[in-house]
Image (cartoon, rainbow, N blue to C red):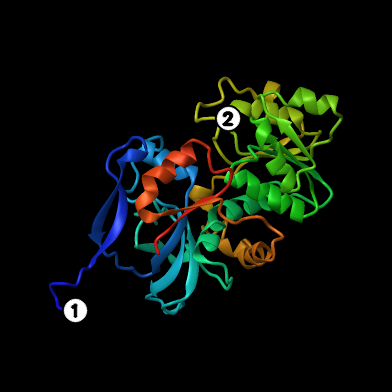
Amino acid sequence: MNAQEWSWDMKAIVISAHGGPEVLTLTELPDPEPADGEVLIRVKAFGLNHAEAYMRSGAWGKVAAVPGIECAGLVEADPSGQLPAGTRVVAILGGMGRTRNGSYAELVTVRATHVVAVRSPLDWAGLAAVPEVYATAWSGLFGNLDLRPGETVLVRGATSSLGQAAVNLAVDHGATVLATTRDARRAPLLKELGAADVLIDDGALAVRVAEQEVGVDAVFDVVGNNVLRDSLALVRPRGRVCQLGFLGGFEPVRDFDPIADLPSGVRLSFFGSAFVLGTPAFPLTDVPLDEIYAKVGAGALRARPTRVFRFDEIVEAHRAMEAGEALGKMVVTLD
């Protein structure tokens, strides 16, 4: 190959303007170079996340040109020498897609603290379906909620990819899982994941939970602000509620009054994975990714992608994600 045929430009998908899926544009950008403390990764696949739709639409304000908050791929270069070229890795967050270009590209630089070597023999699509949702679900369940075997946890927004990961992990941990969905047709899916019961969520579950005399120890809430009061009301005395998403929208909780809205003894917390995962306070080394991948490979955790798209199908992929068609994790592969 002569010099005229050689290209130093990688293919990447950029947000050409804030808007719908159609603003995602395939283009070429200069290959990134890793600085000290960074790793250059050749992306083989990446998961799709609602956070990327928020960034694309402008809901999160100014963000990086290239979206994508996670990926699976091969180390291209690591200036520290810690990860040899060719090492199979996954990368999560660290500002990807938000404050720095993300993983919707053939190459991406990621802070070394947000890169994890993996030994799993899963294919690239299988590897990419796990990192963000399972690291977030694990952190919410066992960090914020301190879920114990034998306890009852209600997963609100359970048909989302994050919700399904939480159901999987909680069942595997020996907890009793109540799962919620707004669509009764999705109840069989949640039963297959191991949910003991499925509740159709109309935004007012506390009364029904009380009538059934179900003692809910913890709530893993992906729906967010518009059901927060109800989530707080449905846990037992000294129960725990962790909010991890905004599927119900970003409208703030109006006139929230701790005296009236926060039951005595109930603990409320928030886990914002996009801002803290991989930081010193929430290191990725705390998340047992190797163990999770082993259980996925053995079939103990159902984490295989529900749909796989090609790189040039990114607009269709975002449309499917926003339409709620996937019923699980969707990924994009570059090979």
Q: Nearer the viewer, residue 28 or 150?
A: 28
Secondary structure state at the residue bearing disc 1: loop
Q: Earlier in the sequence, mark 1 or mark 2?
A: 1
As measured in the structure, the alpha-carbon distance from the residue carrying label 1 to the one carrying label 2 is 57 Å
Residue 86 location in percent, x, y? Answer: 43, 77
Image quarter of the N terminus: bottom left
- For the point 36% across and 35% down, which residue is it? 20
- For the point 49% across and 48% down, which residue is it? 274
Q: Which residue is mark 1?
A: 1
Q: Residues within 10 Å of mark 1 (few under 14, many from 20)?
A: few
Q: Residue furthest right?
A: 213
- In the displayed structure image, the side of residue 9 where residue 77 appears, left or right: right
User: How many badges with numbers are in the image?
Assistant: 2
Q: Which mark is residue 288?
A: none
Q: Nearer the viewer, residue 335 or 17?
A: 335
Residue 329 location in percent, x, y? Answer: 55, 49
- For the point 59% across and 33% down, which residue is it? 224
Secondary structure state at the residue bearing disc 2: helix
Q: Say which amino acid is labelled 1.
A: Met
* Residue 35 visible here: yes
Q: Say which amino acid is labelled 2.
A: Asn
- In the displayed structure image, the side of residue 64 where residue 73 appears, left or right: right
Image quarter of the C terminus: bottom left
Asked whether the beta carbons under mark 1 and mark 2 sit within 8 Å of each other, the answer is: no
Q: Which residue is mark 2?
A: 225
Q: Quadrant of residue 229?
A: top right
Residue 319 location in percent, x, y? Answer: 43, 39
Q: Quadrant of residue 266?
A: top right
- In the displayed structure image, the side of residue 123 where residue 30 appears, left or right: left
- In the displayed structure image, the side of residue 21 where residue 181 appears, left or right: right
